[in-house]
Amino acid sequence: MSEKEKTLSIIKPDAVERNLSEKIKSIFLQNNLSILESKKLHVSKDEAAEFYKVHQSKPFYDQLCGYLSSGPIEVLVLEGENAVLKNRELMGATDPKNAEEGTIRKLYGISIDKNSVHGSDSKDNASKEISFFFK
Ligand code: CMP
């Protein structure tokens, strides 16, 4: 049985900078994900480090935190049936060059860092990530 759930999406600096937010949001809406909350903000490197804490042992962690804090982002709470998985399908593979045709990262991603969007990878992380941005 499918069920309604929530997930967090981040439109990353590379996409905000290229004015892709409306195009990306329309992909969510066309695919039966509603946007419950949205806000544009600019996180500090410390906030990015806290958000991406699960990746702290990874070799790319410092660069990742530097990147997320490099410019304005837009954070969204998406809701719909199987929202976590659906959002991940719409985003496509982490590295745009491996992403399927029609996915957000294939359409707009530039590189594995500048891959335009982030999405929660599980229901548990979705609720943690939503509370991180929407207290
Ligand atoms: P995101 O879904 O935001 O979650 C972690 C991010 O780390 C990922 O997207 C990528 O943008 C970034 N990243 C940078 N290098 C790598 C890598 N080698 N493997 C996975 N993710 C990476």
Image (spheres, rainbow, N blue to C red):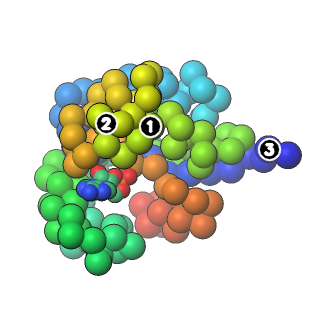
Give the image location of residue 111, x and y in percent. Answer: 21, 40
| Element on which disc 1 rests | loop
Give the label on residue 96, or none: 2
Instruction: Tell whether 86 sits left or right of 47.
Output: right
Q: Nearer the viewer, mark 3 or mark 2?
A: 2
Residue flagged by tag 3: what amino acid is it?
Answer: Ser
Instruction: Examine the rendering and report whether any part of residue 47 can be seen.
Output: no
Give the image location of residue 82, x and y in percent. Answer: 68, 44
Q: What residue did someone put label 3 on?
A: 2
Q: What residue did someone put label 1 on?
A: 92
| Element on which disc 2 rests | helix
Q: Do the residues under discs 2 and 1 have CB atoms within 8 angstroms?
A: yes
Q: Nearer the viewer, mark 3 or mark 1?
A: 1
* Mark 1 close to ligand 1, CB under 8 Å: no
Give the image location of residue 65, x and y in percent. Answer: 21, 63
- Quarter of the rendering containing residue 78: top right
